[in-house]
Image (cartoon, grey):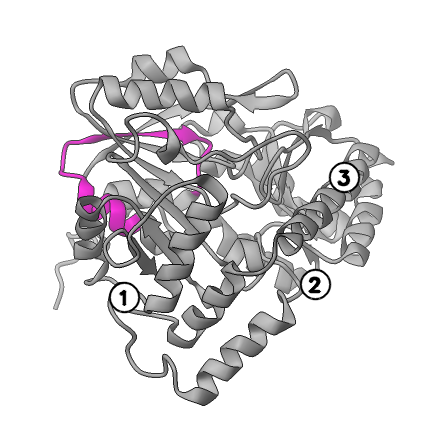
């Protein structure tokens, strides 16, 4: 028997509970609402890539345990993608590691690189797994808040510098940034790189939305800046780029020493996963540039479609330059509690969204912010916009 005096859940995870995505998706199912909360597409990706997975299954490739670092075809394709798009030269045998999505990559990187007592600086609001992974590593998270200014959420570089202490081990950078949709500029990234070099910090970069940048925004990996190649763990995945989020194929790139460290933790998490899908993603990464251009243009159009609908409904809309999320503010409705607003929204309008307040250490910082996703079919976005018009009346 267990002692009733001791909680079953360890203290490092006690603060987290059920993720907001599970909570709001369950609410969508229960109420029959349109789910614009959790970020997953409602259509599959390219048919030829799905058929590549079927072909791998039928040919018996990946049906048993694949190699621990990932199948060679995928590691080679990842290295080729990084070289072709960003000029980064990687050895697929020693500098690429395939993971069970970017979420496992983040967990493995933080578990491998952090010691209890280390501090990790993360851009706030942040994807909810960041805080949990930092806690599991026994480290302390230190938020640096992105704040809306001049049309987008911006990083205060002075605040970032002031957050670094003698205990700071690592910067956790996400660009394009979920949930705000901001894309760090070359000037901002250059300043982050200079700080990391000056203070001898490791950097983990979450770049899963690298192919979803809009307008004049450009995604530039932090590893391309001077002094950063040897201190940066770069993370990305196939789910967001190819609309197969259920396949859970992600990857880590970096120097042999960094990748070896991350693999040391990863091997005791999933060990391996998604065998047949790895072969399909290898083919996906070699798709012609026309695919990536059309993918980006289609999502920019969807962003504008939903953004116009949200403005017409009365929201203050922060126009994203990346990802497939729009952050809004509900103060024009005379409301300030995003969590209460999102819980009531299905009954009011038949739409589900996510309160950004759960992505802040201090919920008050994002108390009036609500996030919607636009990676849905046009008719779904039109219907959601029509339903949200009830708020305007």
Asked whether, in this view, residue 212 is left or right of residue 83, the answer is: right
**Farthest residue, direction right:** 393
The residue at the point 24 percent across, 44 percent down is 255
| SS category of the residue bearing label 1 | loop
> Is residue 154 shown in magenta?
no
**Percent position of residue 389, x then y:** 84, 41
Q: CA distance from mark 3 to mark 1?
A: 39 Å
Asked whether, in this view, residue 112 is left or right of residue 124, the answer is: left
In the rendered structure, are the residues bearing label 2 and label 1 in contact, judged by CB atoms less than 8 Å apart?
no
Disc sitting over residue 304 in the figure: 3
The residue at the point 42 percent across, 62 percent down is 249
**Quadrant housing the N terminus:** bottom left
**Percent position of residue 18, x then y:** 41, 53
**Percent position of residue 171, x then y:** 31, 30
Q: CA distance from mark 2 to mark 1?
A: 34 Å
* Residue 266 lies in quadrant: bottom left
In the rendered structure, are the residues bearing label 3 and label 1 in contact, judged by CB atoms less than 8 Å apart?
no
Badge 1 is on which residue? 270
Q: Which residues are magenta?
A: 107-127
Badge 2 is on which residue? 32
Earlier in the chain: of badge 3 and badge 1, it is: 1
Earlier in the chain: of badge 3 and badge 2, it is: 2
| SS category of the residue bearing label 3 | helix
């Amino acid at each position: 028997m267990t002692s009733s005096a001791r909680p079953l859940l360890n203290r490092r995870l006690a603060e987290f509970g059920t993720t907001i995505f599970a909570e709001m998706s369950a609410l969508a199912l229960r109420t029959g609402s349109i789910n614009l909360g959790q970020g997953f597409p409602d259509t599959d990706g390219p048919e030829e890539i799905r058929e590549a997975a079927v072909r791998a299954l039928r040919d018996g490739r990946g049906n048993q345990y694949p190699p621990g670092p990932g199948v060679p075809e995928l590691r080679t394709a990842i290295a080729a993608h990084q070289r072709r798009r960003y000029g980064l030269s990687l050895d697929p045998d020693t500098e690429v590691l395939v993971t069970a999505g970017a979420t496992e990559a983040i967990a493995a990187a933080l578990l491998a690189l952090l010691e209890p007592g280390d501090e990790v600086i993360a851009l706030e609001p942040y994807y909810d797994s960041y805080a949990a992974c930092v806690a599991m590593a026994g480290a302390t998270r230190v938020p640096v808040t992105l704040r809306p200014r001049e049309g987008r959420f911006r990083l205060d570089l002075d605040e970032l510098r002031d957050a670094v202490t003698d205990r700071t081990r690592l910067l956790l950078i996400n660009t394009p940034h979920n949930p705000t949709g901001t894309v760090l500029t070359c000037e901002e990234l250059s300043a982050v790189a200079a700080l990391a070099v000056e203070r001898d910090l490791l950097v983990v970069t979450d770049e899963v939305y690298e192919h979803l940048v809009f307008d004049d925004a450009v995604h530039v990996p932090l590893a391309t800046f001077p002094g950063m190649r040897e201190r940066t763990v770069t993370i990305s995945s196939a789910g967001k780029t190819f609309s197969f989020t259920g396949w859970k194929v992600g990857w880590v790139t970096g120097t042999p020493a960094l990748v070896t460290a991350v693999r040391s933790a990863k091997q005791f998490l999933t060990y391996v996963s998604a065998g047949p899908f790895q072969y399909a993603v290898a083919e996906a990464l070699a798709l012609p540039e026309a695919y990536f251009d059309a993918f980006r243009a289609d999502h920019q159009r969807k962003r504008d479609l939903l953004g116009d609908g949200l403005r017409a409904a009365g929201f203050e809309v922060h126009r994203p330059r990346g990802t497939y999320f729009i952050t809004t503010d509900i103060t024009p409705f005379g409301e300030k509690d995003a969590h209460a607003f999102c819980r009531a929204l299905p009954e009011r309008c038949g739409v589900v969204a996510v309160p950004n307040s759960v992505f802040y250490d201090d919920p008050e910082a994002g108390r009036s912010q609500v996030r919607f996703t636009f990676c849905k079919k046009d008719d779904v976005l039109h219907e959601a916009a029509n339903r949200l018009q009830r708020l305007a009346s």
